[in-house]
Amino acid sequence: MFRKVQPRVWAFDCEWTPDPISGRLAYQLPDTLSDMEVLAEMWARGGATPEVPRPFLRTSLCRLLTIALVDRSSANGQVKLNIRTLPAATSGDQPGDEASILSQFLRGVGQYQPQLVGFNSFNSDLLIIRQRAIALGVAAPAFCRRPEKPWEGPDYFRRDNDCNIDLMELLTGGAWDRGTRTSLSDMARISGIPGKMGTDGDDVAELWLQDRIGDILNYNVFDALTTYLLWLQVAHFGGHFTTDEWHEEHERLEALITSEIESGARPWLQLYLDEWRRLRSFRTQFAAGMAETQAGTAEGDASAAVGGVETTAAVPGKAPGKKRPTSPAKGP
């Protein structure tokens, strides 16, 4: 469990897809192959099967497409929320420059030193960010600075510290056995938070091939919102927010999403908001039903206990309410 909530929190998520340029270089493929042929070769070498024709590939061979985050800043008792994306906007069919996306994100982390929150971020999102930044020649000295002592600044290369929170590791203890591992979508849904809604990580490559970058960015924002809400659950569990404060955080995020919809900036967030409200309503109704059931069970148990006394008292040969006679004391 993290020790405190930092003044700046970035709950973030990244999306990526196999990169034909990296595939050509890594596998020394001929220039005569088309990008689609290169991708097919990359998937084949990555273990493609008829059941899984497009397996996930090593992150170093993938191109980072988008980064989305919920930015929470707190100062002087005031909390502000924003949704930020890289690229900041898209025409729907034009990808952002990968090196620019990486540079802006890493420069922002180095400058604002936020508490990064992700799901499987230590072994996935932050890993591809570092790998691709190094491969593309991006410099990030502020992000890479390693303090000599913990109190001298954040260290984004260390596990188990307050500046780099991986919710998956926190929830599973790093275990990968089937009995304890969980996904962001599963953990979110059972917490009353939207999970995957029609699109998941398996679909990103196909969306990329169809030049639907806008759809990828929208999906990326959904995951960032879900990551933020799950972080709120964990922070409430850890005592960093009282229950009233936790509800206020939900209201604050709902107000932000509503504002984004009504302003026309992100009207597609209505889908997320509707699903969030539906799940919350379901959990509220379910909790109320459980409370009634438990109250009824307790009342039934009490009646059964009383009934048990009456039944015992009515057994033939026994006088109700009287104890079994004891043997008389023996005299001298």
Image (cartoon, rainbow, N blue to C red):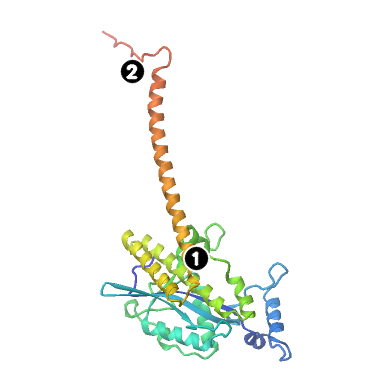
Residue 90 locus on image (x, y percent): 52, 83
Q: Which residue is mark 1?
A: 174
Above or below, 158 against 27 in this view is: above
Q: Quadrant of the N terminus?
A: bottom left
Determine whether, in the image, residue 29 is placed left or right of residue 70.
Answer: right
Q: Nearer the viewer, mark 1 or mark 2?
A: 2
Query: Would residue 36 be seen by someone viewing this image from the given angle?
Result: yes
Indicate the amino acid at tag 1: Gly
Indicate the amino acid at tag 2: Gly
Crowdedness near tag 2: few (<14), some (14–19) or many (≥20) residues, C-alpha within 10 Å: few
Mark 2 lies on a secondary structure that is loop
| Of the image marks 1 and 2, the number of the one nearer the N terminus | 1
| Labelled disc at residue 198 | none
Question: Foreground: 176 or 124?
Answer: 124
Question: Foreground: 277 or 100?
Answer: 277
Residue 32 locus on image (x, y percent): 74, 91
Query: Would residue 191 be seen by someone viewing this image from the given angle?
Result: no
Residue at x 42% of width, y 86% of height: 107
Inter-mark Cα distance, 1 to 2: 61 Å
Determine whether, in the image, residue 52 is placed left or right of residue 302.
Answer: right
Q: Quadrant of the C terminus?
A: top left
Residue 286 locus on image (x, y percent): 45, 50
Determine whether, in the image, residue 211 is placed left or right of residue 155.
Answer: right
Mark 1 lies on a secondary structure that is loop
Residue at x 40% of width, y 62% of height: 233
Q: Which residue is mark 2?
A: 321
Residue 291 locus on image (x, y percent): 40, 45
Residue at x 53% of width, y 86% of height: 96
